[in-house]
Amino acid sequence: MTATTEVYKRNAEFAETFKADDLPPFPKMGAAILTCLDPRVDPAHVLGVGLGDAVVIRNTGGRVTDSVIDDLAALGHLAQLASGKDEPPFELLVIQHSDCGAELFAKPDFREGLLAKTGVDVSEIAITDHDEDLRRDLERLRKDPRVPKYITASAHMYHVESGKLRQVEGPARLDA
């Protein structure tokens, strides 16, 4: 059986009892979560996030990249249009995790080998120190003019060894 076949089988089972056709397009929890694409860090499982609860953005390392900034700018603008107010449309939780593959990107030999072989430069998303990198990512959000400053953001570290989440920086508006 292929992964695609398995996915369609599971979707058919899900659709048999589907009752979420009336979910609003904005998150019920008022949350947006940026985290790593690592399968051990699925917000549905590690945070108990259900269908429609949160916007989930996943990328390598759970890093704030230009693409993430574009997504947040678009989401903030859509939420503002829908509400007609300059108020926090959602709270952003930036979550990195222990034993992350992006830690390898901090090793010059690995990073240079990847660049030489694929042309992909991962220096911007290399994780050298989770707490400091999370703080830098929040600072990048504060400084980027594309991101609505009325968004509230926080930084967290998820430990794959214990399943526990640790707060690195508490929730604060980006204009604070």
Image (cartoon, grey):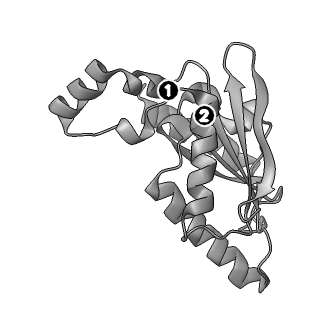
Q: The disc labelled 2 sits on which kind of residue? A: Glu
Are dots 2 and 1 in contact, CB under 8 Å?
Answer: yes
Which residue lies at the image location 77% right of the left edge and 64% below the top edge? 23
Q: Is residue 112 visible?
A: yes
Label 1 residue SS? loop
What x and y, as percent, mark residue 4? 44, 37
Q: The disc labelled 1 sits on which kind of residue? A: Thr
What x and y, as percent, mark residue 17? 77, 48
Which one is nearer the viewer's eye here, 33 or 149? 149
Mark identifier at residue 128 = 1
Q: Would residue 167 be found to the left or right of residue 125 on screen?
A: right
Q: Would residue 142 be found to the left or right of residue 122 on screen?
A: right
What x and y, as percent, mark residue 156? 72, 36
Quadrant in the picture for residue 164 = top right
Which residue lies at the image location 56% right of the left edge and 36% below the top edge? 133
Which one is nearer the viewer's eye here, 50 or 5? 50
Furthest toward the top, the residue is 161
Q: Is residue 119 above or below residue 22?
A: above
Quadrant in the picture for residue 142 = bottom right
Q: Which residue is mark 2?
A: 132
Label 2 residue SS? helix
10 Å crowding of disc 2: few (<14), some (14-19), many (20+): few
10 Å crowding of disc 1: few (<14), some (14-19), many (20+): some
